[in-house]
Image (cartoon, rainbow, N blue to C red):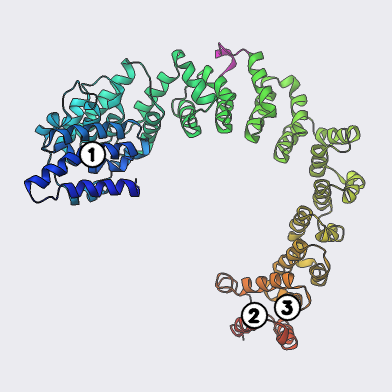
Amino acid sequence: MKLSAAAWDIVNQLAASERGQSWFRQMLGRRDVSSLLRKLGELNEPAGLPYVAHFLTSVDRDARAAARETVAVLLTQISAGDLLALEEQSLWLNARYRWQNWSRIQPADVAAIAGSPEQREYPAVLSLLSFHKNGYVRQEAVRLLTDIDTNEALPCLVIRQNDWVKPIAEAAQKEVRRRLQTGPVCVSHSLLELIFQMETWSRYDHRPMIGDLVKRLLEEEQDQFLERQVVALTVDAKLGRDIVGYALSYLKYTNQRLLVYGMFSKDPVIRYQCCRGLRELPVEQCQELSLQDRQMHLECRLNDTFLPVRSEAYRQLAELDPVNAVTTWEAALLDRSRSLQEMACYYLNRIDPGHAVRFYRDAIVQNPESLPAIEGLASVGEASDLEFLRTLFAHPFPSRRCAGIRAVVRLLQRDAIPEVMPFLRDSSPRVVRTAGKSLRPWITQIPSADLLAVVLEAETVYARRHACELLAAQGKWSSFSWLLEACVKAEPETAEAAASMIHHWCSPSQSYRVFTRPSAEEQKTIREMLARHQSQLPEQLVQQIERELSLYS
């Protein structure tokens, strides 16, 4: 937490009002303190609380009243993160350098400082006192907070559950659990965020308390809360995930209403959590969700935008209805995700080997432009499908050309190099990337002259740069002479890319990691290229290559 410039200006004025020398000037200054404190409250900056705290013990009654009001205002809308920041003593140090009154508070002063229990500011002042560095002061503040039945005292009691003084922590834990178990559950967003933050605290085990809260939130009377927090996500997606994840993972509490709400959540992670949770709920124990209802909910998730949700829905539908499992997996074969297509192929081949290939062939006959069918056949097709797959090379859409490249490389392996090489000059960067990725396993078997031709003749800058990368991937010393030729003959942008490949090989990260010694022939070729084109090459590049060669001479 940090103060704005306007808040710092008010803090400095408050400090100046306390430095008056004469009694008369002190009285004049005190008249301004109350208005300054209220102005600080209007700015609504919780970082000002340590400075306001000093005036809770002021000798002036109006200043004390204004300080209480300001504390109440600043703590009313404070976020969970800012409230936890009050635990950091470094936040109080700067205020302590200016004023010492706060640090001198004793346990006997707590009740008087908080004021009358009937006052609206009473819970807020006690909450602030519960952050005092003196453990006895905190203990007295917690004792008085436990007598307040309103929810205003709950956030600070939650934090005090992790107090390093064990009696304070035990008292706070007892009171928080009592309130969650007996009273009506009505928690704000910041309080929920604070409670789930406790899971990361290691001083004590707070999971039972968090579990009690989640169980209360899953009761029927909390339906409106669940719908607002889990489905609509009107406040915070992370908080909804915490609630659902804690209920399903830690409590193993498969609440049927929660699962139904979660499967229609706006948050994809919650939908996936609840879809997985449905698997843990046996059909025979499910009272609110019949088999038909469960299948209906899962079928709705087959078109989910989040891949893991679709994947889980397909698996569960196939398990719930084994008779129609083939039909279910056939639908998955035409999903837009290749990973889901591969999963469907795996399960179908366990049921009927070769079924996926036949299905894709029939699907392409019915709809030759279906991208899922084309990609599916590219991943599982056989040699008899090569004739069709090669026709994709001339397709106007890059996605189909990429599918054809992947299929031919998968089926022909190294023999596919002559067919794939022309696609390194393709106008689509996607096709160029796919072709380059497919050729990398055999990169050292591709003639360097062919790659250099791509570097010099390809129409797009992307294709030329990609060919430079492939040249560099052929090996450190074997690629230097070809990259140098590219630096000399290629247009400026491509020449710069080729030079950057040489710089990369000569950089400390590569030079001190790759210790391959250049052969005598490689050294001779590189030195001849340097001598022949020295005037056309950047001086720094020449010096870098010569320094690299000197390491092995």
Q: Residue at x 54, y 25 (%)?
A: 232
Residue labelled with disc 3:
484
Q: How many neighbours does mark 2 have within 10 angstroms: few (below 14), some (14-19), or many (20 or more)?
A: some
Residue labelled with disc 2:
541
| Residue 164 badge | 1
Q: Amino acid at mark 2?
A: Leu
Q: How many neighbours does mark 1 have within 10 angstroms: few (below 14), some (14-19), or many (20 or more)?
A: few
Q: Is 112 or 300 nearer to us in this picture?
A: 112
Q: Nearer the viewer, mark 2 or mark 1?
A: 2
Distance from label 1 to label 3 (Cα)?
Answer: 67 Å
Question: Dividing the picture into quarters, in which one does residue 86 lie?
Answer: top left
Rendered location of residue 283, percent (x, y):
59, 16
Task: Choose the circle earlier in sequence order: 2 or 3.
Answer: 3
Q: Amino acid at mark 3?
A: Leu
Main secondary structure of the magenta stretch: loop
Query: Under tag 1, what secondary structure?
Result: loop
Residue 288 painted magenta:
yes
Task: Choose the circle earlier in sequence order: 1 or 3.
Answer: 1
| 138 to the left or right of 192 | left
Task: Choose the circle earlier in sequence order: 2 or 1.
Answer: 1
| 220 to the left or right of 411 | left
